[in-house]
Amino acid sequence: QSLARENKLSLSQFSTYQIEYYPLSTQDKLYGYSFSLEVQGQQQDINDFLNKVTNFNRIISIDRVTTGKTETGQLNLSLSGKAYFETK
């Protein structure tokens, strides 16, 4: 959410889903959760946002990216994927 704000984007949807263990064992320390988001803004701001997401200081996988234009001419970006983290 703060990443969208930093890039001057309007966040219209953000969802996270149930945390999962990898490889499906509670004794392992790797976890992940699915997420989806939708933002609107200018093309350069969208590009900067995607660059920061793909270089984020956390392992993420991106499953789907879709773009389009809004009625006002701004770019619309929908993104879904998984974020992973480790506990100590």
Image (cartoon, helix red, strand yellow):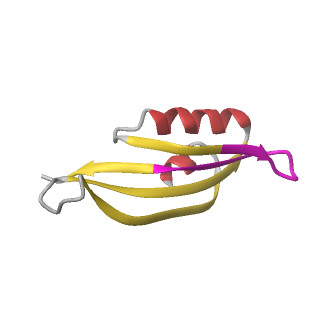
Horizontal and vertical percent position of residue 10: 66, 54
Please identify the residue farthest to the front as the structure is shown.
Answer: 24
Q: Is residue 82 left or right of residue 65?
A: left
Q: Is residue 23 left or right of residue 43?
A: left
Q: Nearer the viewer, residue 28 or 43?
A: 28
Residue 51 locus on image (x, y percent): 53, 32
Q: Is residue 20 left or right of residue 17?
A: left
Image: 66 above or below 17: above
Percent position (x, y) of residue 16?
46, 63
Is residue 32 inside the magenta stretch?
no
* Residue 78 covered by magenta stretch: yes
Q: Magenta: predominant secondary structure element?
A: strand
Q: Quadrant of residue 61?
A: top left
Residue sitting at x 35%, y 40%: 59
11 or 69, nearer to the observer: 69
Q: Measured along the vertical axis of the image, is residue 73 above or below residue 1?
A: above
- The residue shown at (52%, 45%) is 63
Q: Position of residue 42 (x, y in %)?
A: 73, 40
Q: Residue at x 77, y 45 (%)?
A: 68
Of 26 and 9, the residue lying toward us: 26
Q: Which residues are magenta?
A: 66-81
Residue at figure coordinates x 55%, y 61% from the top left: 14
